[in-house]
């Protein structure tokens, strides 16, 4: 394989059998349970990277079923999202994600900079309750529950939330172990089709783990929960701040 062939072919590793295909990436019947809670302000301040800012100590814990994901297949994901602002615009910072799909871990980290780690999340209906769980190895680190479809939710609120920009801290090391890429990345979800949204009574428990520190942002008060199903597209990213150049774009 000559140099031109390598340049033409290369977009992911391994070169001759990439861990994931080229996008775009479409998701059908993507099912969310999102539980919003109040956390400790000082703990949150220690986790949100500048130049992002937050105003209220609010976190959203997500459990997501993705049964039909182009290029990635069928998997489940869970993690913490923090409402933030960037240059006065409201958005969401993706703080940590845990999932059970190797191609999605590789693609998310390499392309956008999603903070993904391998774990075992689940989202399922247990009798009259929607239950989300997250296990890291053999240890249960998160449990979220909501009464199943007790009340219809406002679809316009869900659309508004999904239309906001999302931010990621993309870090790729150099071969000598130093940092080669350290960027704040912005992306959107597009082509959203909502198929239903519901709310109800809810709860959330987080437990300590040395390598999956979800409890570093403790649950002080559960505020609300929403359950919805949607088709959507994960759009390409844009670098909005390069930490190594100290240059905001």
Image: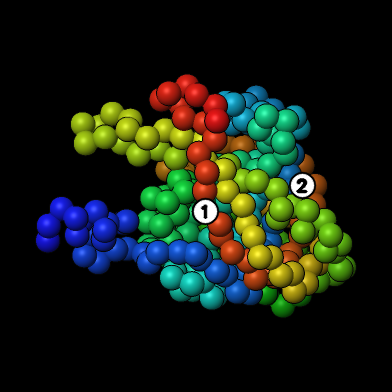
Crowding near the residue tagged with mark 1, few <14, some 14–19, many ≥20 C-alpha atoms within 10 Å: some
Crowding near the residue tagged with mark 2, few <14, some 14–19, many ≥20 C-alpha atoms within 10 Å: some
Pick the quarter of the image with the C terminus.
Answer: top right
Answer whether residue 220 is visible to the viewer in this image. Answer: no
Pick the quarter of the image with the N terminus.
Answer: bottom left
Q: Are marks 1 and 2 in contact (CB under 8 Å)?
A: no
Q: Nearer the viewer, residue 14 or 39?
A: 14
Answer whether residue 240 is visible to the viewer in this image. Answer: yes
Mark identifier at residue 236: 1
Q: What percent of the width, then of the height, locates residue 197?
A: 79, 67
User: In this rendering, would 62 be left or right of 209?
Assistant: right
Taking the spot 41% from the left edge, 25% from the top edge, the residue there is 244
Q: Tag 1's secondary structure? A: loop
Q: What percent of the width, then of the height, locates residue 88?
A: 73, 30
Q: What residue would you read off at disc 2?
A: 222
Taking the spot 62% from the left edge, 30% from the top edge, the residue there is 52
> Which image quadrant for residue 156?
bottom right
Mark identifier at residue 225: none
């Amino acid at each position: 394989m000559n140099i031109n062939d390598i340049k033409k072919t290369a977009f992911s590793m391994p070169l001759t059998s990439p861990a994931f295909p080229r996008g775009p990436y479409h998701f059908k019947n993507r099912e969310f349970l999102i539980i919003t809670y109040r956390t400790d302000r000082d703990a949150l301040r220690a986790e949100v990277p500048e130049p992002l800012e937050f105003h209220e100590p609010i976190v959203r814990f997500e459990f997501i079923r993705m049964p039909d994901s182009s290029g990635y297949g069928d998997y489940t994901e869970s993690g913490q999202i923090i409402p933030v602002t960037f240059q006065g615009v409201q958005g969401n910072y993706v703080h940590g994600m845990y999932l059970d799909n190797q191609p999605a871990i590789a693609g998310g980290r390499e392309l956008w900079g999603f903070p993904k780690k391998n774990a075992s999340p689940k989202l399922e209906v247990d009798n009259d309750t929607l239950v989300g769980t997250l296990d890291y190895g053999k240890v249960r680190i998160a449990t979220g529950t909501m009464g199943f479809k007790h009340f219809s939710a406002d679809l316009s609120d869900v659309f508004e939330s999904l239309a906001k920009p999302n931010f990621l801290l993309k870090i790729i090391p150099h071969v000598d172990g130093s940092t080669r890429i350290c960027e704040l990345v912005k992306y959107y979800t597009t082509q959203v089709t909502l198929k239903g949204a519901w709310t109800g009574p809810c709860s959330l428990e987080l437990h300590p783990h040395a390598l999956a520190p979800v409890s570093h942002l403790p649950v002080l008060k559960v505020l609300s929960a929403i359950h919805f199903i949607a088709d959507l597209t994960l759009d390409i990213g844009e670098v909005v701040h390069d930490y190594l150049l100290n240059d905001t774009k």
